[in-house]
């Protein structure tokens, strides 16, 4: 669209109205806000490939098991809008919870529910996701296929801090000690990748390599380590073709994830 200020809309009707005459194609970047350079990379890619770009900011309460985790999720809409504006984004969709889940809403989509609503509301030709959430990319692709939503799902590389830690809105919660230990996620993935490159094909051995590396950091507690089929996400006994290494690690109350594709 043109070089005017980023518009912020909150209601479904306002969103549809704003997009009715928007130049196509439209590129969507779904986020939970507290935007960082990882999000910026998605915005830049979307800007390069689309005539109109939309960033959605919605912290989905149903995605949080622990209400305390939801309550402390970092938020600053003014800062997010300023970042979107600096990246030349046309529209920010920042709905309240009742706009996404209206009273009496009664249809459940098992996977990618909020993204399904965003895809339908925005009707984007393309939507951009980070490889950091590789499982989410697979789930959203599947959902779009199952529901015949024509939005193309595009995965973009994970943006990292210089020490390898994947950028995440959650990193702000890390204490200095936890922050110093957090690159162990990346190191564990690279250790397993090296073993794989040296010919190791046992899923158990690769998982154990990751666990052992994380055990070297006392403040890091493994939530899961996974060596899974890159398409079905089933755990693998043996890595014969491609695979997805992934892990989730807790530092105090902060849970971080990362992953690495093999093959
Ligand atoms: P979030 O706001 O954390 O839900 O992330 C919104 C989108 O940005 C998701 O598609 C994420 O995968 C993506 N994203 C988050 N962190 C990064 C990163 N470090 N590099 C690339 N994409 C990211």
Image (cartoon, rainbow, N blue to C red):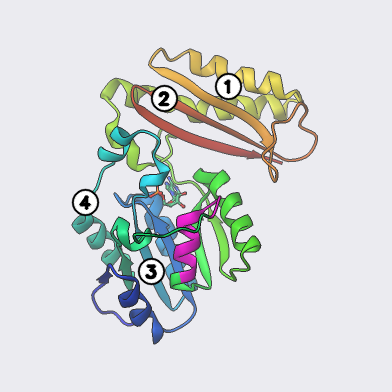
Q: Which mark is residue 76?
A: 4
Q: Secondary structure at mark 2?
A: strand
Region rendered in magenta:
109-120
The mark found on residue 155 in the picture is: none
Indicate yes or no whether the magenta region holds residue 79: no
Q: CA distance from mark 1 to mark 2?
A: 14 Å
Q: CA distance from mark 1 to mark 3?
A: 38 Å
Q: Position of residue 137 (x, y in %)?
A: 56, 51
Q: Quadrant of the C terminus?
A: top right
Q: Is residue 86 placed above or below 33 in the rendered structure?
A: below
Q: Is mark 4 within 8 Å of ligand 1?
A: no
Q: Residue at x 46, y 63 (%)?
A: 117
Q: Where is mark 3, residue-wise?
A: 54
Mark 1 Cβ inside 8 Å of ligand 1: no
Closer to viewer: mark 1 or mark 2? 2
Hey, which residue is sitting farthest bottom in the picture?
Answer: 21
Query: Within 8 Å: ligand 1 and the Cβ of disc 2?
Result: no
Residue at which label 2 appears:
250
Of the image marks 2 and 3, the number of the one nearer the N terminus: 3
User: Which residue is at the front of the view, 222 or 82?
Assistant: 222
Q: Which element is circle 4 on?
A: loop
The prevailing secondary structure element of the residues shown in magenta is: helix
- Quarter of image, res 63: top left
The residue that appears at 31% across and 59% down in the rendered structure is 98
Residue contact at pointers 4 and 2, CB within 8 angstroms? no
Q: CA distance from mark 4 to mark 2?
A: 24 Å
Q: Which residue is mark 1?
A: 210
């Amino acid at each position: 669209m043109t070089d005017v200020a980023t518009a912020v809309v909150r209601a479904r009707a306002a969103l549809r109205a704003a997009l009715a005459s928007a130049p196509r194609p439209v590129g969507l970047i779904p986020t939970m806000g507290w935007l960082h350079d990882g999000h910026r990379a998605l915005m830049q890619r979307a800007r390069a490939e689309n005539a109109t770009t939309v960033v959605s900011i919605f912290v989905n309460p149903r995605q949080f098991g622990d209400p305390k985790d939801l309550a402390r999720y970092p938020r600053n809409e003014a800062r997010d809008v300023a970042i979107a504006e600096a990246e030349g984004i046309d529209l920010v969709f920042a709905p309240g919870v009742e706009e996404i889940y209206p009273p009496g809403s009664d249809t459940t989509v098992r996977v990618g529910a909020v993204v399904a609503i965003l895809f339908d509301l925005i009707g984007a030709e393309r939507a951009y996701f980070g490889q950091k959430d590789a499982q989410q990319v697979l789930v959203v692709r599947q959902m779009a296929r199952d529901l015949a939503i024509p939005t193309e799902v595009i995965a973009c590389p994970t943006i990292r801090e210089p020490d390898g830690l994947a950028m995440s809105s959650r990193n702000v919660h890390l204490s200095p000690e936890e922050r110093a230990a957090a690159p162990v996620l990346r190191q564990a993935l690279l250790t397993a990748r090296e073993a794989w490159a040296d010919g190791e094909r046992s899923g158990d051995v690769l998982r154990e390599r990751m666990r052992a590396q994380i055990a070297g950091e006392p403040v890091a507690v493994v939530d899961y380590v996974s060596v899974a089929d890159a398409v079905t996400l089933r755990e693998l006994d043996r890595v014969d073709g491609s695979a997805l290494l992934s892990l989730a690690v807790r530092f105090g109350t902060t849970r971080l994830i990362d992953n690495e594709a093999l093959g």
